[in-house]
Structure formats: C-alpha cells, structure tokens
C-alpha cells in the first residue's frame, strides 16, 4: 500500500473514532492485504489521534479468528456500566480477563508472563464501518474492533483452572473450563511479537469460553468466572456511557 492510500485509511478510521460517525468501507487501494500492514495502520491511527496504548488486547474477530490490537485506558468502564448500542455499532460482547503485568515482557524472552493482578471483564467490541469490517485485516486496522472493557474487582491470579460463562439475562450455565495460564501465555506471545510491554501494562484476553453475543437494545449481559466473580453491562438506546 502506498503512503497516500495509507494516509487516507488512517484519516477515515481515526476520524470515525474521534467523532463517533461511521464511515463507508475503505476503497480497494486503502484496504490492508496482510496482518503487518493492518497493524501498521492501527499504529498510525493511534498516532493520528495522539493516543498511547496501555497494553495489548487479544479478541475474537467477526470471522471467528483471534486478532490483536491496542488497549486504551480511556475504554475502561466499571462493572454495571450502561451503554447505548448506537455508539457500539455492530457490537458484540464476550467474557474477558485483564492481567496487570508485574514485570516487563521482554520481546526476546520466552518465560510465562508475570501477572500481578487480574480483573474479570466483559469485552464489548465495535466497528467504525457502516457495514462492519469487510475482513479480519480491516478489523485489525480498526484497532481490532476495540469498543469498551467493563472491569470487575481486582483479584490475585489463581493457580487452578476456572470456569467461565457468558450469560444473556438471568441464566446460570455451568460454563467452560478455562486454563488461565495458557490464555495469558498466548497474549504474552502476541505482545512480544509487537515489541514487548513494560511492567504495569496490561494484557487483555477476550472471547473466553468461545461464546460471543451480539448487542441489542434492552439487553443485559454478564460474564461469570468461578472464584473471580462476575461482570455485567446493560445495553439501551439512551444510556450514558458510564457506570453510575
């Protein structure tokens, strides 16, 4: 992709993030054709906006694959958040965990990440495009579909596997067994591929348990984690994007 085409793509995506307005699909010459180009676009979008990421987020793409993008502290919300679906177009929710790094992730190292603290979370993705992402590379360029991250209380990292369930309404399913260490090892590998992270940065792993729910007005979605608690958010058409 030439620099002019990349500049147009950055302006389109960055402008949509800045204003909240959706944009038409990228023209063919501005569409990233591989992961490296898509990640370069995402980095330039952050630079265009003047945003500094606080960590790395691994999340499910619309096509079911896992993609990696930046995490922004401004996108954190408290448990019980109420969100208007109109600001989260093509939004989807999944169970997630946020780990705070107790030590830097050296890009050359292969040791497991040092997770000093853990937050159960509900990842809420969104798209800046009128018709949603056309493919996974466009989704990566769109900050990997970053929307909001609803956070529960800080917890220590458990040693044993736990169960995770994503619930719409009042259901209480048994959930899926999750190996936390394997999930964060994958996220750490991605963060190292992108250059590493300092101590205090975060790793976010979304799509846990393999379930993703589409957002709808009037919906209430909860992510439940055995031993860690639950995190929930409500979705409407006129709520403020905050937890009161």
Image (spheres, rainbow, N blue to C red):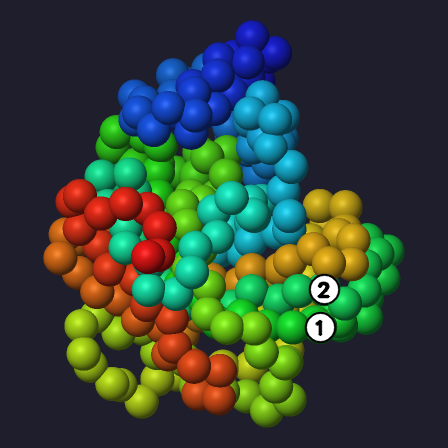
Q: Which residue is drawn at 55% across and 13% down?
A: 7
In this view, the residue in front, 34 or 200, is 200
Residue tagged by mark 2?
101
Contact between marks 1 and 2 (CB within 8 A): the answer is: yes
Q: Is mark 1 on a helix, strand or loop?
A: strand
Q: In this view, does 74 lie above or below 31?
A: below
Spatial CA span between label 1 and label 2: 6 Å
Lower position in the chain sequence, tag 1 or tag 2: 2
Q: Which residue is drawn at 62% across and 60% down?
A: 203
Q: Is residue 189 in sight in this rendering?
A: no
Q: Where residue 110 sits: x, y (%)?
A: 81, 66
Q: Quadrant of the N terminus?
A: top right
Marking on residue 116: 1
Tell me: 213 left or right of 226.
left
Q: What element carries label 2?
A: strand
Q: Is residue 161 above or below residue 96?
A: below
Q: Where residue 2 sits: x, y (%)?
A: 59, 12
Q: Is residue 201 in sight in this rendering?
A: yes
Tell me: 191 left or right of 61.
right
């Amino acid at each position: 992709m030439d620099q002019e085409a990349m500049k147009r793509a950055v302006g389109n995506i960055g402008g949509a993030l800045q204003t909240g307005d959706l944009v038409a699909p990228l023209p063919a010459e501005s569409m990233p054709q591989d992961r490296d180009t898509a990640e370069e676009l995402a980095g330039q979008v952050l630079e265009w906006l003047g945003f500094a990421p606080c960590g790395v987020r691994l999340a499910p793409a619309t096509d079911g694959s896992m993609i990696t993008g930046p995490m922004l502290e401004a996108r954190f919300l408290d448990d019980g958040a109420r969100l208007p679906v109109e600001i989260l177009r093509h939004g989807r929710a999944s169970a997630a965990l946020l780990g705070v790094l107790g030590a830097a992730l050296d890009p050359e190292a292969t040791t497991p990440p040092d997770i000093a603290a853990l937050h159960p979370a509900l990842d809420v993705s969104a798209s800046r495009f009128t018709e949603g992402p056309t493919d996974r590379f466009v989704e990566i360029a769109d900050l990997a579909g970053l929307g909001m991250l609803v956070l529960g209380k800080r917890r220590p990292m458990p040693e044993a596997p736990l169960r995770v369930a994503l619930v719409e309404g009042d259901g209480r399913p048994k959930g899926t067994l999750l190996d936390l260490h394997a999930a964060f090892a994958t996220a750490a590998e991605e963060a190292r591929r992108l250059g590493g992270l300092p101590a205090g940065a975060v790793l976010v792993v979304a799509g846990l348990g393999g379930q993703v729910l589409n957002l709808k007005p009037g919906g209430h979605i909860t992510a439940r984690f055995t031993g860690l608690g639950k995190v929930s958010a409500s979705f409407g058409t006129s709520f403020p994007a905050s937890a009161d």
